[in-house]
Amino acid sequence: SPEYQSVGETGKRTLWAVFVIMTLASAAFAGMSWTVPVNKRIFHFITTLITIFAALSYFAMATGHGVAYHHIVVNESHPHVPDTQHDIYRQVFWARYVDWSVTTPLLLLDLCLLAGLNGAHILMAIIADVIMILTGLFAAFGSEGTPQKWGWYTIACIAYLVVIWHLALHGRAMAMSKGGNVARFFGALAGFTLILWTAYPIVWGIADGARRVSVDAEIMCYAILDVLAKVGFGAWLLIMHNRMPEIGLEL
Ligand code: RET
């Protein structure tokens, strides 16, 4: 008989809680834009869009949308027993990938503009990031036991290294050339981002990849990461923006 791995009560409550947090953060970030001149609100605009998108995606997931059962076939072999086929149906929230394909480029845009990267480097970092998310989506729906699944995962990890390359090398160099507070702040915010983002492929590998944890545990891990990577990141950026006028970009 097939085994179903589905969201439970804890998972549902967590999805609703993050929806509320993202909505409140959107209102707060939009409100903060009133504290700076109209032509200096580019970071507020980008950062508010990030939490609005996350709120939409969490609303979809909390109400049972943006999710599909992924059929996984596991061939079990035991000594002295003929091979048996075990069917697993696990819920995969594809809404996350829709969210990430929009919000991770926007998060990168925040960092790139803070560093003062030029358009070509921004574009390359963002394209590598979109490749990372879309190949991650292929990995999530890849068939179990085929080389494709971890193959897509590997490609996504390489794309992630390209993103890090652009930010850590070019971004850091540009930020350093600005000197002083901006250089220090970019280093801190980019370091925070690097640590958080690197946790995503680890959670993916344990949850979606190896299915070692329940769907609810997976939801909770991503919930903590999403709140830190979007709300924590955004709050830090916008608060520092008000303290350090030199961060502000003229539109
Ligand atoms: C996947 C799986 C394939 C390998 C890699 C991944 C990286 C995902 C990242 C996601 C970041 C998400 C953020 C969300 C916003 O809050 C797709 C999980 C490398 C880095 C920051």
Image (spheres, rainbow, N blue to C red):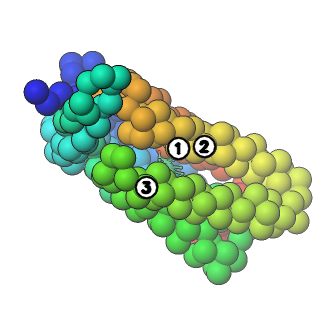
Q: CA distance from mark 2 to mark 1?
A: 6 Å
Q: Label 1: which residue?
A: 201
Circles 2 and 1: CB distance less than 8 Å? Answer: yes
Q: Residue furthest top?
A: 10
* Of labels 2 and 3, the one closer to you: 3
Label 1: how many residues lie within 10 Å, few (<14), some (14-19) or many (20+)? some
* Of labels 3 and 1, the one closer to you: 3
Q: Is 104 located above or below residue 195 in the figure?
A: below
| Residue 2 or residue 139, whichever sits in front | 2
Question: Which numbered tag is attached to residue 198?
Answer: 2
Residue 221, can we see it?
yes
Q: CA distance from mark 2 to mark 3?
A: 23 Å
Of the residues shown, which amino acid type is indicated by label 2? Thr
Within 8 Å of ligand 1, the CB of disc 1? Answer: yes
Of the residues shown, which amino acid type is indicated by label 1? Pro
Relative horizontal placement of residue 136, taking residue 62 as reference (left or right)? right
Residue 226 in the image: state x and y as whole percent.
46, 38
Place residue 133 in its image quadrant.
bottom left
Circles 2 and 3: CB distance less than 8 Å? Answer: no
Report the number of discs: 3
Of the residues shown, which amino acid type is indicated by label 3? Pro
- The residue sitting at 70% across, 49% down in the picture is 190
Residue 233, can we see it?
no
Circles 3 and 1: CB distance less than 8 Å? Answer: no
Q: CA distance from mark 3 to mark 1?
A: 18 Å
Q: Label 3: which residue?
A: 147
Label 2: how many residues lie within 10 Å, few (<14), some (14-19) or many (20+)? few
